[in-house]
Image (cartoon, rainbow, N blue to C red):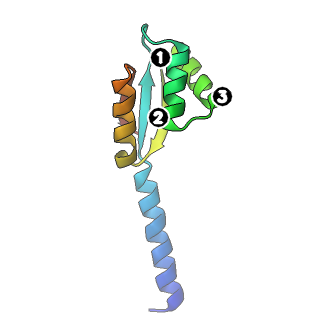
Amino acid sequence: MSRYSVHHEEALLEELLEATERHHEIVLHNDDVNTFEHVIVCLMEICGHDPIQAEQCAHIVHYNGKCSVKRGAFEDLEPRCTALQDRGLSAIIARS
């Protein structure tokens, strides 16, 4: 097997692994309990959103009923989703 072929196969494998890791997302659902400010702070602290992104997601949740707020590997999303739930937000992990 040539050096190029091995490198090409490794690149394809890495690409495949990256693609399969991103098949989950945290979906935040609207509720009548939490304030915009609370949701925005949670998204910044837990999901790493900047203030504008967090505010936009909060408005999408309010007007559409739900919003995907973070995508990635399940192992990364699970503790974030739990942290959102622990702060009183309605969040689930879904396959994207």
Position of 75 compared to 69: left or right? left
Label 2: which secondary element: helix
Position of 5 compared to 74: left or right? right
Q: Position of residue 11 (x, y in %)?
A: 50, 72
Q: Which residue is mark 1?
A: 65
The residues bearing labels 3 and 2 have C-alpha atoms spaced at a distance of 15 Å
Query: Which amino acid is tagged 2?
Result: Ile
Badge 2, how many Cα within 10 Å: few under 14, some, many 20+? Answer: some
* Badge 3 vs badge 2, beta-carbon distance below 8 Å: no
Q: Which mark is residue 83?
A: none
Q: Nearer the viewer, mark 1 or mark 2?
A: 2
Q: Which mark is residue 52?
A: 3
Q: Which mark is residue 46?
A: 2
Position of 84 compared to 52: left or right? left
The residues bearing labels 1 and 3 have C-alpha atoms spaced at a distance of 19 Å
Query: Which amino acid is tagged 1?
Result: Gly
The mark that comes first in sequence, 3 or 2, is: 2
Label 1: which secondary element: loop
